[in-house]
Structure formats: C-alpha cells, structure tokens
Amino acid sequence: MGRSRQAVGAVVLALALALSGCQRSQPAAQPTPAPPSPSASATGRPARPTAQDLDVAPTRDPVTSVAGRIAIAGDPGALVVDEVAGEAFVVGLPGEALQAIDLASHEVTGAIDLSGTEPLGPRLAADPYGGVLYATRALGSWRALTVIDVASLRVTDVIDVGSPGLWSAAVDPTTGTLYLMEEGTRGDGRGEGDLLVLDGTTRAVLGRIPLDVDESQAGIAVDPVHGRVLVSDWDRGRLLVIDAAALRVETTIQVVASLATRCENCLGGLGSPLVDPGSGLVYLAGPPPAAVVEPPQALAAGTGWALPTGGPPGAVPVQPVGVGASGIYVVDPEAGEVVASATVPDPALGIDPAAGAAYLAGQAFSDGVRSVDVGTLTVSDAIPVAGGVRTLAVDPASGAVWAAAEGGLVVLE
C-alpha cells in the first residue's frame, strides 16, 4: 500500500518542504475532511487482535545495530509505527508535514500538511486495525481530534469533543477505543486533566474520568489483557491504574517517593508508562531511585539537589537531580506497588514484549540507544545514534526500533 503512493508522495513531500520553509501571514485553515478512501473499509484488513494474542513471551533478541538513516522534511517530532499498513508516520517541524515512510524500503511515500497556529506540534496515535491515525493538538485553532486515513493519507474527519485542549492519546488495539488526555475545566490551571474515552467506530464520547494530574505531561498506556489503562502523573511521581470497563481509577501508586510533594525546582518527573501485556507489569522512567537527604544547600549545579516547594534551604528533604542518570521503576498494578527499580543512563522510551526489552535513550546527553532486560533490569551497551533521540517507536511485527533523532529518523534492527 505504501509503495503505491510513492510517485505522488514525492510531489506532495516537495509541497510539504515548501510549506515548512515559508512564513505564514495568516493562520493556517483546518483541512477540509475528505471522504474515506475505499481501502478504509476494505474487507482485507486484518481482524483486531484478541487479548490472548497480545499475551506473548520473548521470542527474539533486542536490536543491536543501526540498519538505516532516513532524511525527512523538517526536524522529527511525533512518531508512530503502523505495522498493518507497513509504514511509519512522523511529523516534521516546523511546517508540520506528516510524512509516511515504508517500513521495508525506508522510502518516504507521501505527506500531508498538518500546520497549526501555535508552536507545539501535533501528537499522534495509531489504530492499525482501524486504518486511521489520530492527531491531537492542545493549543491554537486546532483543539479538535483529527482523523487521518492511512491508505490515502487524507483527513477524513475533524471531531469537536468539546475539549479546551487535547494532549497525549492511546488506542486499545483489541477494540479501537481511544483514550485522550484533555485539559481539565474544573480550575484555572494545570493539574486537573481528564481522561476522555471515545468509541473507536462511532467516535462518540463514552466517558470522562477526572484525574488530578498535569495533562500536558501525563502519559497513557493501554493493557487490554488485564483490562487496564495506565496514566502517569509527572509532577508527583504517581501511576494511576484505571479499570477500562468501569471507567474509574481503581488504584493510585506512588512510584517515586521523593516526588510525593510537589517540587518547584525538580529537574525531572515520572515518564510515560510502558506496559508488558503478558505480565501486566508497567515500566516507568523517573529520577534516580535514591534516599532523600538533607543537603546543606537548596540547589546546586550538576548532580545536585532541588528544593521542594515551600521549604527553606537545608531544612527539608530534597530530590537528587542531575544529568547522566535516570531511574527505571517496575510497577505491579495488581499488587499496587513498585517491585523493582534501578539506576539507568537514560529515560525509557519504548518496549518490545516479544524481545523482553525496554529501550532507553536521551534527548540531549545520550550516546545512543540501549536495551534493558525487563526481567533483570540489565542494561546493554549503547548503539551509537548521533544528536540524541527525542522519541522511539517499536515495530511490533519485526521488533525494529524507529528513533526520531536530530536530522531525521534512525532505524535499528
């Protein structure tokens, strides 16, 4: 499917490149929805997996080397892999050209302009078995949910869900249910986000779950095997475990003890959850696990200390911070507790249950991508990737890792 768009993709990509380089005097208009392409309802699309299909044991090794580098229009932002379509999708900034890249040939096959009116680019979520991409935008004129048909790479719907802004999103592959982090309306500041739940077929709102988290930083993961949705609370180091059937928070787990009190100067928080559906365990990156101590000064450079909000220097416990170290935490939602933790070189950005590995990388100070054994938390040597890695996407079919790095995409196998 991807290669059939190759010729037209080159023309469209040239247009996207031109768009990314020009200055707009007027805000870009929202795209006019196009009718779904015939392939969007084709009977040949694979059936959705069952929960049992996602309960897999490790059958392959983690990636070990760079297999290719791909130049794109702009600096890579949001990135997703659609294993059914056989393509990766990445947003190039500025200009916000959503570009499709064939997973096998590594060739750009098409592009569409998703330009908005504010500096934050769109975030992406893929529903491979529904044949669509979802783009969310938190600010500016595009606060609705944008639906993109992957076969034609055209916008097929722009849905106003009555939200003041949409942030991260995740899809349950077994049902197509879409989970979105939206700005809360219960106050005048961040920290009151809601989890918005949409039907994947009708896109009707199924419910809103009030969450006391910073919506701009919260991450979402779906565990269809155990019927859970996991939401991370960046500021306070918590994991919220949501019953997907009842649409309610069933457990709140304090993952990073030193973040239990809001911290004014802390230079790190709890990252997005990575879930292993087979075991049900959740992996999260955060500050290095360490005892909280009382240093003589409130804040020091490098591997120093950050003073929690409201406390005088030297009088309250503080959280260790610094460049070059992170923590990875293993949470058992069933038990409601952290079952393991370790200090690692970089934050966790992706997981491959079939390889029994999570992948680590750092945006600015990392020397590459590492794998960490999800059972032992043993960290591998780095696979060199120049320029730092902003985000990762794992191809569930092949296990290849796609990394958004400075200057384009890097594929690791």
Image: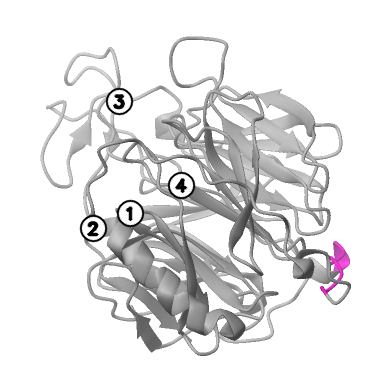
Mark 2 in CB contact with mark 3 (< 8 angstroms): no
Please report the residue visible at 28 percent of the width from the left and 23 percent of the height from the top: 264
**Secondary structure beneath label 2:** helix
Nearer-the-camera pick, 19 or 331? 19
**SS class of the residue under badge 3?**
loop
Residue that numbered label 1 is attached to: 95
Label 1–label 2 contact, CB within 8 A: yes
How far apart in space, not on screen, are marks 2 and 3 (Cα)?
49 Å
Foreground label between 3 and 1: 1
Q: Where is residue 388 in the image (x, y as percent from the top left)?
A: 27, 66
Residue hosting label 2: 21
The residue wearing badge 3 is: 317
Side of 339 relative to 12 (left or right): right
Mark 2 or mark 3: whose residue is earlier in sequence = 2
Residue 323 is at least partly visible in this image: yes
Q: Which of marks 4 and 3 is nearer the N terminus?
A: 4
What segment is highlighted magenta in the picture?
Answer: 45-52
* Mark sitting on residue 224: none
Pinpoint residue 275: horizontal percent, then vertical percent. Answer: 64, 56
